[in-house]
Amino acid sequence: MVVAGDKEYCMHTSASMIWNNGVLNFHAFGWGPVVVNRDREGTQLVWECADGSTTHMERICTLPPEHKVPTPRGKRDRSF
């Protein structure tokens, strides 16, 4: 969250996300250096940023069972 004056804004970034050996890497502007690595340690998500900072996050919510497996959308043709 970014606060400017009396208004709050959600942060927005421009980065591509590429999986590399089970780690999600964020590349600046879609082509630049890796700026964030996202990995898991047990039940925590670990974010390692280019500036050397690390953030450990615990999951505080879960998806309802009906949303864990997405339902097929769109037309399905059976070829065989």
Image (cartoon, grey):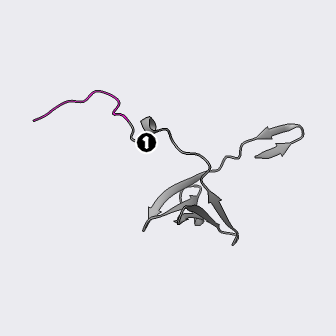
- 36 or 33: nearer the viewer: 36
Residue 61 lies, in percent from the top left, at 59, 46
Q: Residue furthest bottom?
A: 52
Q: Residue furthest front?
A: 65
> Which span of residues is magenta-colored?
71-80
- Graded by Cα atoms within 10 Å as few (under 14), some (14 to 19) or many (20 or more), the crowding at tag 1 reads few
Magenta highlight on residue 36: no
Judge left or right: residue 62 versus residue 79. right
Residue 76 lies, in percent from the top left, at 24, 30
Name the image quarter holding residue 80: top left
Magenta highlight on residue 75: yes
Residue 79 lies, in percent from the top left, at 13, 34
Residue 54 lies, in percent from the top left, at 67, 68
Relative to 50, residue 61 above or below? above
The residue depicted at 59 percent of the width and 55 percent of the height is 29
Name the image quarter holding residue 73: top left
Q: How many numbered dots are placed on residues in this image?
A: 1
Q: Residue furthest right?
A: 5
- 40 or 18: nearer the viewer: 40
The residue depicted at 39 percent of the width and 41 percent of the height is 69
Mark 1 secondary-structure assignment: helix
Classified by dominant secondary structure, the portion drawn in magenta counts as loop
Give the residue type that dot 1 points to: Lys
The residue depicted at 64 percent of the width and 59 percent of the height is 57
Residue that mark 1 sits on:
68
Q: Residue furthest top?
A: 75
